[in-house]
Amino acid sequence: MNFLHRPVLYKETIENLNCKPGHIVVDGTLGAGGHAQGILEAILPGGILIGIDRDPRALEHTKEKLSVYKDAFKPVHGNFANLEEILSSRNIDYIDGLLLDIGVSSPQLDDASRGFTYMEDAPLDMRMNPQDEFSAYDVVNGYSKNELTKIIREFGEERWASRIAQFIVRGRPIETTKQLVDIIKAAIPAGARRKGPHPASRTFQAIRIEVNNELEALSKGIEAGVKYLRPGARFCIISFHSLEDRIVKRAFRKLSDPCICQPDAPICICGLKPSVKIITRRPITANKKELELNPRARSAKLRVCEKIDE
């Protein structure tokens, strides 16, 4: 894997985490360690960064890269969805900051053998953790037409989901990304293929999300993360497509205003109190300079909330 990786919204993320020396911070999506290095610089001396990643290859690379920080850096092979278990097993009751940089990483995309990209031929895989048994091959070759239609429509927001699913079922067995791309292209009418992004991009996104259970993991990570934040601690989430951003936006909004009383009720009687305040009413996006250096940052959105006393 190529680990030459430029972290998106780096300056904005480090500033919004508001880290101080001595803080305990979690980077739930460690990746190549770009954000992690900035966090470590901000929390030393005395701080600890717990870096979680489900990809053991990324973890090994970043362990070596950040070894100069010695005991201040604690790498963990795992899924941020299991944050509660990870922290409780280390006897950590509170953290002073949490970062999630959601989705597939640039090193994973750049390694064609992982099967994430539709631009090069490779076996159907798409596992963020190669140790998992379930892969894109199982989705593409094992799901029914209705199941494929559902995930391509919901996770890919693909207009031609039913037709793509029909062509996939008809074209089985499908072994490689190139075979899948050719089938998707054949399923989408020529006029529609000429507009917008690559015709396979939405379907590949949908299959990847299904393989890695990404949206459920995001919801679980938000729920667990807020529990562990100390009052005044910041929670930063970077997302890259509308499904993720919608989950983050709604979760933060609900945490900041959990009241379930009728809108016309004169006073709140449900007793539910906010646990966070929203720092970014609108998501932070990449500026022109960053987009010139890193075109992949164009879809990145950073949302931030801060834990309050309940």
Image (tube, rainbow, N blue to C red):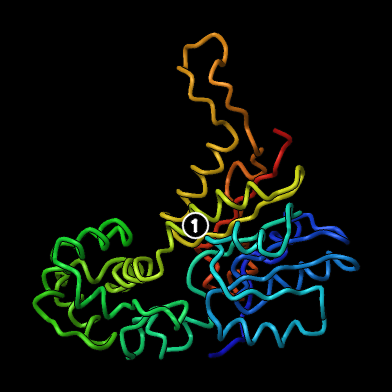
Which amino acid type is shown beneath numbered disc 1?
A: Leu
Q: How many marks?
A: 1
278, above or below 144, in the image:
above
| Left or right relative to 247: residue 224 | right
Q: Where is residue 158 in the image (x, y as percent from the top left)?
A: 26, 61
Q: Residue 241: where, in percent of width, then height?
A: 44, 59
Q: In this view, does 185 lie above or below 24?
A: below
Q: Which of the two residues, 101 or 26, is positioned nearer the viewer here?
A: 26
Judged from this view, the residue extending furthest toward the right is 45
Quadrant that contains the C terminus: top right
Question: Label 1 neighbourhood size at 10 Å, few (<14), some (14-19), many (20+)?
Answer: many
Q: Nearer the viewer, residue 93 or 33?
A: 93
- Left or right: where 172 falls relative to 75: left
Name the residue rendered at 63%, 69% in the picture.
290
Can you say whether 160 is above or below 261 in the image?
below
Residue appearing at x 66%, y 38% in the figure: 277
The quarter of the picture where residue 29 lies is bottom right
Q: Mark 1 points at which residue?
A: 218
Residue positioned 56% across, 42% down in the render: 252
Residue 201 in the image: state x and y as whole percent: 33, 71
**Residue reaching furthest top?**
266
Q: Inspect this view and state whether residue 269 appears.
A: yes
The residue under the point 8% across, 77% down is 170
Left or right of residue 144, residue 26 in this image: right
Please identify the quarter of the rendering in which residue 174 is found. Answer: bottom left
Q: Indicate the position of residue 106 as horizontal and vertical percent values.
A: 53, 78
- Residue 285 in view: no
Determine the residue located farthest toward the left in the rendered image: 170
Q: Which secondary structure, mark 1? A: helix
